[in-house]
Amino acid sequence: MGKRLSLIMIVKNEAVLLQRCLESAAKYVNEIVIVDTGSTDHTKEIALAFNATVYDYGWNNDFSAARNFALDRSTSDWNLVLDADEFISNDCAEAIRDFIENKEAIGKIKRVDKFSGPDGINYEQIYISRLFPSSCRYSGKIHEQIISDLPRVIIDVEIQHDGYFHQSKNERNIPILLEVIKENPLDPYFHFQIAKEYRGLERQEEALAHLKIAYTNMTHQESYAPSIIVNLIYAIIATGQLGEGIQIIDRELEFLNEYPDFFFVSALYLLELISSDPEQYGGLVSLIEKYYKKALEIGDNGREGSVLGTGSYATLHNLGVFYEVTGRMVEAKDCYAQAAEMNYPPSIERLAGMQ
């Protein structure tokens, strides 16, 4: 017979996205449990069309409570948790079945987050605990975590996530995060999370303030520590408060020696710093090329929180721009050509303009 697997979701007004999610996941599970926190659209009808069991739940600003309510209604040995703005993008039937039949662990799946950046659409990859035995439950009002002593194992399941394009969710999350921060004023995780919400709303000063607190209070042992540092440098650039950036970069060079994103953003920062005061900082120009080359040397290595392209096409393009501005046209064209071969639109356009 084999072990049973349930898909567990909490939803509200997800009629636009829910079908895509359920179509991607239904074939892998024995049961679909959906908890609705107050939909006024056709969310429930879509869920019922997939033979889901649907429960109503009064929303109380506590994601763990809602998720645990859903988990309590699962009748399976294992649970897979997805949100409506996510969908499975690889063929993972064998990986899931092998894991739940043979492992006593929590499965971490790769999520690729799509978001808008200064250079267009970007994709960031993280690994999240979403496949686990039925005994596991969540803790935390927001950005909730599975509480368990079981080992966490990365499995070959990949989901795409485009919820960061739906900014209303950012507005919803901020009051909950502020409440949690009041209870845990020095916890770097929640300051990091609220900074991401503020960044999504382009409230850069507030994002920077919380990233500074997160950076000051982190231990460097956190899985998200590299992302705090990288996001802090981006926030420093976005606000124009360039003063502390150079010390942060120097301090973290060794710690982030294998993170292409760090060298990518460090090069961007140096460009801003030099432009702000060429006389004082002009001597740092050579570091821009050095950092971009270091990012390419590392490559897109799939590290937690890494943005796709910072070890390849995005860096090649930026290095091309650097060479072009400094009059090294042969090297510029070579960089653009390499990025164009990876179908990077800005490089394809730039090459066409140089013919």
Image: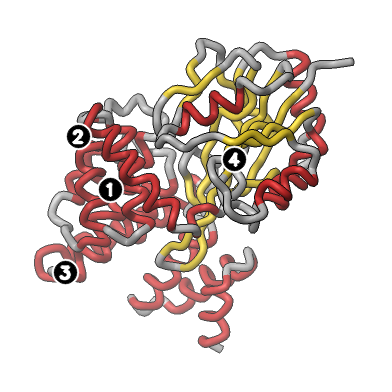
> Can you identify the residue that label 3 sits on?
276
Which residue is drawn at the image coordinates 72% and 49% (left, top)? Answer: 45
Q: Is residue 38 left or right of residue 278?
A: right
**Mark carried by residue 36:** 4
**Label ID, residue 91:** none
In the foreground, 319 or 191: 191
Q: Earlier in the sequence, mark 1 or mark 3?
A: 1
For marks 4 and 3, give the CA distance. Answer: 51 Å
Q: Is residue 25 placed above or below 340 in the rendered structure?
A: above
In space, the residues marked 2 and 1 are separated at their CA atoms by: 11 Å
Q: Pick whichever of labels 2 and 1 is earlier in the sequence.
A: 2
Where residue 180 sits: x, y (%)?
29, 32
Element at label 3:
helix
Please identify the quadrant where the N terminus is shown: top right
Which residue position holds label 2? 216
- Front position in the image: 28 or 263: 28
- The percent position of residue 153, horizontal first and vertical second, equals 60, 22
Q: Earlier in the sequence, mark 1 or mark 4?
A: 4
| Three-letter amino acid code at the position of disc 3 | Ser
Q: Residue at x 34, y 39 (%)?
A: 176
Residue 110 in sight: no
Total labels drawn: 4
* Residue pictured at 33% horizontal, 46% vertical: 174
The part of the image, by quadrant, that contains residue 270 is: bottom left
Return the x and y of residue 247 as percentages of the image width and height.
17, 45
Give the alpha-carbon distance from disc 2 to disc 3, as whole Å: 26 Å
* Residue 318 in the figure: left or right of residue 126: left
Amino acid type at circle 4 is Asp
